[in-house]
Image (spheres, rainbow, N blue to C red):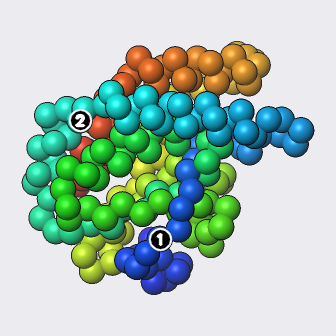
Amino acid sequence: AAAGPGRAGISAGPGGAGAAADPPAADPPAAGTDRAGYVTLNLQRTRRIGRTYAPGADIRDAVAALREAQLWLALTEIWCGDSAQSLPCIAALAALDPRIDLRILSRDENLDIMDEYLTGGGRGIPKLIAFGARGEELFTWGPRPRAASELVAREKERGAPKEEILLRLHRWYAEDRCRSIEAELAERIRG
């Protein structure tokens, strides 16, 4: 059974801060790598998407049809490339309706929550968990759109180096322009 607010320390009160992804991108940069470089690049991605993204009609309709207030928790880390690509879209969708309260939590500071929402046994981020007004879990999403996960799986299967996989993945995100995230979240919102 899924946990609602309270069971894993999740509350509707003020949340933590942070940002995040799923393997291979969800793994923290290896020791000795330039974390600051990841953070700087992710900040640029986040700002670009924030400036250019406009939600499409279908997701706007899905959000407009909400029947009750929702709490959206996003588990993430600041170094995560998938989070940099996804969270600006998720934040824009949450901003469409004042009944959606988006809280962003650091995965590493909330492992008790993260461990209830593993993806394939891993702590893949970003992970979005939506709760209804009574604290019941409505849906989860993440750590990346299905098509992006399939692309990563294909590239790993063919033995592509991590840097090549990440290059292809971020090119995919740029071409997709949040449309896959929209479609997947619209499907979940509608139930």
Describe the element under mark 1 as helix, strand or loop.
loop
Describe the element under mark 2 as helix, strand or loop.
loop
- Residue beneath the point at 59% across and 61% down: 106
Q: Which residue is mark 2?
A: 55
| Quadrant position of residue 182 | top left
Quadrant occupied by the N terminus: bottom left
| Quadrant position of residue 102 | bottom left
Q: Which mark is residue 15?
A: 1
Q: Is residue 15 left or right of residue 69?
A: right
Q: Residue 124 location, x and y as percent?
A: 60, 49
Q: Measure the alpha-carbon separation of dots 2 and 1.
A: 25 Å
Foreground residue, 101 or 62? Answer: 101
Q: Residues within 10 Å of mark 2 (few under 14, many from 20)?
A: some
Q: Residue 177 location, x and y as percent?
A: 36, 25
Q: What kind of residue is marked 1?
A: Gly
Q: Which numbered disc flags the more N-terminal residue, 2 or 1?
A: 1
Q: Residues within 10 Å of mark 1 (few under 14, many from 20)?
A: some
Quadrant occupied by the C terminus: bottom left
- Residue beneath the point at 69% across and 16% down: 164
